[in-house]
Amino acid sequence: MALAPKVELRQGQSLVMTPALQQAIKLLQFTNVELAAFLEEELERNPLLERNETETGEAADTRYANDEDSSGDAEPAVPDSAEIATRDDGPGDDSPLDIDEGALYDDSPSEQFADHAYDSGATQFGSSRGGNSDFDDGTYDAERAGVAGGVSLKDHLLSQIAVDIVDPVERLIGASLVDSLDEAGYLTGELATVAERVGCAVERVEATLARVQQFDPVGVFARSLAECLALQLKDRDRFDPAMEAFLANLELVARRDIQALTVACGVYADDIKDMLAEIRTLNPKPGLAFDTETAQPIVPDVLVRLRPDGSWYVELNSDTLPRVLVNRAYHARVAGTAQRRPGDKAFITQQFQAANWLVKSLDQRARTILKVASEIVAQQDGFLRFGIEYLRPLNLKDIAQVIEMHESTVSRVTANKFIATPRGVYPLKYFFTSAIASSAGSESHSAEAVRHRIRDLIDRESVVDILSDDQIVITLKTHGIDIARRTVAKYREAMHIPSSVIRRRLKKQSATA
């Protein structure tokens, strides 16, 4: 067959992602904070949009709730992706939110939404939760350490450089070192890189580093956890050879191997316990004392409460619902004067269509979220009534088939959305967990429920009865859970629970303390 360029006419169908459809998909994925920021921009951009100050919270609750007893028109159907091929998605159309576009989302449900750290006794050295060290005894408080009101760590250190360092080159080196700090106060960059950036010798950078390591808060500019602790001990005049050897063997500290530490440090076991107690009083992340960002409380998107008849009432949180409307009176007034100038007429028409599309898309977004959340509540009825042990294995397809939407729509709806239940506030993704087979041939178990059982078994251990991973597997099989030992080890490590050897050592130490 001859190879030559030629022109062919082919006919085919394809899905075109119009700008309006792309924006509709983004609206569905937005959190309530992102949606509020987006609407602020639209209110500034579009003169025909205005806030709806007349709609009360009760009215919004009535519109977006699964109240089966309420009267009124039936809820309008949410369009599915099958309707997209025959529809022209212009700004004034009801742009569908349900579309199969795998490149725009990740529908793999995460299994790590409720991994809790191991809280039975001392935990592994050096890990952290919520900015506090795991090797403290609960007495360290960032507020007590002195949070600089409105002053960042960078500004605090630069002000000390301006006062304590006179040489301009050393000031430049100090400022470059400050730029290399992470939020915890650790030095992340290489000294050679700083020297190359400033144009000086590495030895001068090292000398400047030794000087700024004396700044407040003590422990900043450290390049490792051991160096951070050593700087604080030197400031207290408690850094002796035994403590130096202690910090050089932090892996033994993590395992609480007192016997090995006594050999490494050349001291008695009681001295090692005193050194452990002193280490707990140090701050492993000194830079966090200047973190001025305040944690924002989670505002749930969906509210669930129990009705007197025992059924669940699901509604959208009226505080997070966007309230915007099209100012039709203003549109009628300016549309008449805009007839004289074609440019003005086209602008008003475009803004009017965009405003109508936005209001319809927001309403459709709210109803889609409510529909998905209501089905999740129906599927996880046992969890809401009896607790985590009754959490069912669930995936996106299970919900999508019932509500007759695509899995991608369910994935977008549940992304970064929260639901307030009688058992607490949870991400919607929390309810999607993989299944663990049942050894008795009955219904499979949720992976999250199995993790809860593993944590409960370990919390009930005694000093003389520490469960190995193999023993946990045997115990779970007696409860009808067929699970492999490597899966138990993976779940245990994800929950930051140490091995049986370390747990036995920790419990013996706590019993003799």
Image (spheres, rainbow, N blue to C red):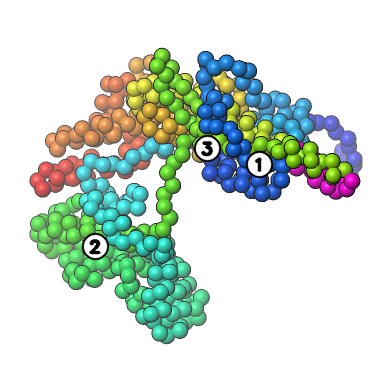
Task: State the residue position of label 1.
Answer: 50
Instruction: Name the residue tied to disc 3.
Output: 320
User: Going from the N terminus, do you reach mark 2 or mark 1 first?
Assistant: 1
The question of residue 246 being in magenta is answered with: no
Q: What secondary structure is found at the residue carrying circle 1?
A: strand
Q: Quadrant of residue 107?
A: top right
* Residue placed under numbered mark 2 in the picture: 247
Residue 486 appears in the figure:
no
Q: Dot 2: few (<14), some (14–19), or many (≥20) neighbours within 10 Å?
A: many
Residue 352 inside the magenta-drawn segment: yes
Residue 477 image position (x, y, % from top left): 30, 23
**Foreground mark, 2 or 3?**
3
**Magenta stretch, residue numbers:** 340-354
Front residue of 372/394: it is: 372
Instruction: Measure how far apart labels 2 and 3 are at the Cα level.
Output: 50 Å
- Earlier in the chain: of badge 3 and badge 1, it is 1
- Asked if the residues shown at circle 2 and circle 3 are in contact, with their CB atoms under 8 angstroms apart, the answer is no
Q: Residue at x 70, y 37 (%)?
A: 326
Q: Secondary structure at mark 2?
A: helix
From this view, report whether residue 2 is shown above or below residue 87. below
Residue 33 showing in the rendered view? yes
